Amino acid sequence: MIKTNKNTEVPMEAVHWMIKKARQKIMDREYPAGEIINGRYQIEKVLQNGSYGIIYLCQDLSTGQTCVVKQMRKSKRKENAENYLQETAILKLLDHPGIPSLIDTFSYEGEQFFSMAFVEGKNVEDTLFATGQQYTEKECLPIIEQLTFIVCYIHDQGVFHGDIRIPNVLLHNGKIHLIDFGLASNLGAESGLKTQREQLAQDDFFDLGDFLLFLLYSSYDGDIKKGRSWTEELHLKPQTTLLLKRLLGITKPYQQCADILTDIRKAIGSFHAH
């Protein structure tokens, strides 16, 4: 504890946090709206001020298109050096309509940046909590199907996202996009990493289950009681329950992405069965 001039004590954790924030402010320059980065990207606004980077909405003056530019934090230089190379290499590798494409990587005024295609839409977190959007079980299943298609694609490329959460999924006009590959792993085509691949795949599958639960709870109007599980609170069709239990590892976990898609289609089909 540290005593201030008013004779009050400040916990050391708070002191460290204040030092960290002051260091960030000194080292990490945030560029203002209107400024042109690297002679090409004119900033419209800051989209996100995260712990590892600052994300700007920009106009690409060379094409006239709206794009997104991510600036890596100098204050996290040690961690970001590897993260920058990893994330940009992964985005360069991937080519899917549900994933923002990489435009360019560059340095400017001693800072590391990369630019990506802009994807229209709100993230699912904002859709659920800011606008109060509700999804029925029947509406949730095509959404998780789209997201699983994207996950199957990246796994086929040897990429595992590692952070499939509601803030990292965009939804616009019924179309899904998966963003933020900052924590992703790229194992490529290496053959000797079977155990690691299986674990990373299981992590992504669990996240798909967690994501689906968030969607399903959006239309839940009962009281959420501590200690009561989702199986008691949500009244779902048996196929949807089985899908969730396997994604979350409660019963036999999925080994293949294709099997998840098969079960999602069965769950969708259960709404049309007579």
Image: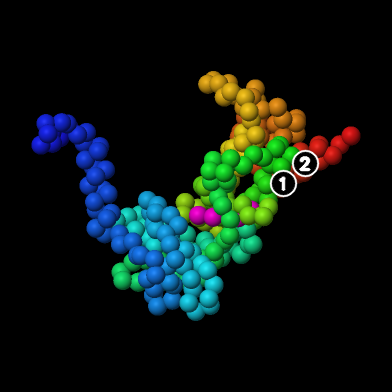
Horizontal side of 180 relative to 214 (left or right) equals: left
- What segment is highlighted magenta in the picture? 176-180
Q: Is residue 91 above or below residue 271?
A: below
How busy is the neighbourhood of tag 2: few (under 14 within 10 Å), some, or many (20 plus)? many
Q: Is residue 78 above or below residue 247?
A: below
What residue type is disc 1 on? Answer: Pro
Residue 230 in the image, given as x and y percentages of width and height: 62, 27
Tell me the SS state at disc 1: helix
Pointers 2 and 1 in contact (C-beta within 8 Å): yes
| Gap between marks 2 and 1 measured at Cα | 8 Å
The residue located at (22%, 33%) in the rendering is 11
- Residue 184 shown in magenta: no
- Quadrant of the rendered image containing residue 13: top left
Between 224 and 148, which is closer to the camera in this rendering? Answer: 224
The residue located at (62%, 24%) in the rendering is 222
Residue identifier under label 1: 142
What residue type is disc 2 on? Answer: Ile
Between 14 and 255, which is closer to the camera in this rendering? Answer: 14
Residue identifier under label 2: 268
